[in-house]
Amino acid sequence: MTKQSSITADDARFPLSKLTLSEMNPRQNVPAAEVEELAESIWTAGLIQNLAGIINGAGGAEIVAGGRRLRALQLLAERHPDLAQERPELANPPVRIAPDLSTAQAWAVAENAARRDLHPADEVRAYGKMERSGATPAVIARAFAVTEKSVCRRLALAGLPEAVIDALAANEITLNAAACFTISADAVRSLEVLEQCRGENWSDHQIKKALKPDAVKDSDRRAQFVGIEAYQAAGGRIGGDLFAEETLLDDPEILATVFAERLAERAETYTRNGWKWVDVSEDDYLGYWFLQENGFERIYKEAGELSPEQAQRFSDLSDLAENDALDAEGQGEFDALNAVLGGTYTETQKAHAGLILYVDRQGTFQTCEGLIRKGDKAAAVAAGILEKSQHGTDETPKSPISQKLREDLARVSQGARQHAALRDPDLLIDLLAYQLSHDLRWSKPFGLSTEDVPNWPTTEGEGYALDARLTEDPPRDMYGKDLAKSFRAFRQKGAEHVRGELVRFLAAQLQGGDEKLAALIEKETQPRTREVWTPNAGNFFGRIGGAYLSGLWRDLLDLSAEHPTGTSFDKLKKAEKAAKLEALFKGDPALHSVLGVTGAQAAKIDAWLPEGMQ
């Protein structure tokens, strides 16, 4: 850089060809996509903020603040050869000239260190004003150098009652909370809910429930079963949630009616298929206790037989299935042969039995077939499709085996099963991994219980990044599933997958044990809290007092009580202190440079933890 001469600070215009990027500018490398976005914004809305620089002695200036703007202007000059005639104000941009080198250096750091994005409420109002003046989302996006999707989300908020946006601007509600109000078209109800939730830290679910207490999500099993189109065809109204990307059904009575009609249509089909009776249940699962409480006996399909050729083909297809080598045609053939082996109900069986239709939690249509009512049992026994009950009656002699003896015999049988299981340790390990990873509860194969070992803060997880194996792929919902089929598929994924599932769910259960055992585990694993957690305004600094933040600032930077950097920090508002500390912990190069952070201080910042953390 050429030697600078001291001049008076002033604004001047320069041709773009006379402007270069100063080495003092912190933004030496800027992603091309950012330059593209900013160029679109400047072309649409003009150069809202001037460049800043210092005279270079060659009739031009070196830009110390506004490096992105300079690149964007240069890009526009490349795309528009006649820029000087078409947009002279962009071809000859204004530059604020620094009076001396030290001022230029201060400007270079200050603009980037003090940069703050628009408050969301200000964005909402600005976008809304442009839309009302006729601007499309695409034009607004170019003007503000953001995506159209971001503009559409803010415009959805622009239609909210002004009181909601005022509450957002005053930080009395969060942006997520404000977004919840977009589901309601009832302004009066919205204001009532706003007054209830203002400053009360309501969850998104609480706000939506208060705004539309009767609305049903499109993920509801009934909605999944009947389909949104059928619901709307019956007159049902839809309320969308743009931000959660979910659909709300505002007429639960219509949904219930359509649901009942669809089930009735299915019931009619089964009735015509020869069953003696068909019932419909509103429940989402019909288990053993339901059958017991209602006095049903159950009969099963008569198994089919495969011809020798079919049996050989079934064996071949089974081998392919185990190796994940079945194509679509082979899978269809395999399913058909399985259906033969699974058997069918005979006409005689159906003449004495019935079935119950229901929809499970996932919205999938299910049947509970082969049920014989109390009044039909005698006829079913006479027809040979049901064995006579072996349960004792008043005339039946009392069994010589007492209940306590029965329990002991059951324990012996259980012991025999455990004894045999010792011969197959791989099966036991596979079963344990399966039980943990599939969240088996009442149907768990082992008498082991897991519990929630908390590892997530009650606030949002900003600044907190655990290994994905602890945060993704939660245990599956196995309610009503075929566990034997699921376990076979689980084992077919191989020993490495089984071990991986076992490891990650055992890690999620780790509590440590007593003091000595916990110390041994930590010595072996060497946990480092700052590896997964960095304090910021949201997770720590904004949740603690201003005096504490001032003390921490001085301690980290080794400042005396009267040091100007410390006393100026004391004068900041709490939110500003939190933001400053967040930038310090993020390692903002510009801020570290201004503060003169030493290597030892940077190491102290990187290792710092609040008292009580390890």
Image: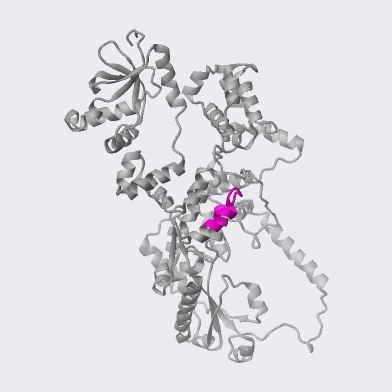
In the image, what residue occupies the spot 32% across and 9% down? 2
Frontmost residue, 385 versus 92: 92
- Measured as percent of width and height from the top left, residue 356 is found at 55, 79
Q: Look at the picture and state if 152 lies above or below 545.
A: below
Magenta residues span 191-207
Frontmost residue, 373 versus 304: 373
The answer to if 323 sits in the magenta stretch is no
Lateral position of residue 559 relative to residue 360, left or right: right
Identify the image quadrant of residue 390.
bottom right
Q: Look at the picture and state if 493 lies above or below 26.
A: below
In the image, what residue occupies the spot 28% across and 20% down? 19
Lateral position of residue 207 relative to residue 158, left or right: right
Q: Is residue 312 visible?
A: no
In the image, what residue occupies the spot 41% across and 75% down? 234
Colour scheme of the picture: one colour
Lateral position of residue 89 relative to residue 578, left or right: left
Q: How many marks?
A: 0
Q: Quadrant of the C terminus?
A: top right
Q: Quadrant of the N terminus?
A: top left
Q: Is residue 258 visible?
A: yes
Lateral position of residue 348 relative to residue 50, left or right: right
Q: Look at the picture and state if 297 lies above or below 547.
A: below
- Measured as percent of width and height from the top left, residue 257 is found at 48, 77
- Measured as percent of width and height from the top left, residue 333 is found at 39, 68
In the image, what residue occupies the spot 37% across and 62% down? 328
- Measured as percent of width and height from the top left, residue 80 is found at 19, 32
Frontmost residue, 307 versus 270: 270
Q: Main secondary structure of the magenta part?
A: helix
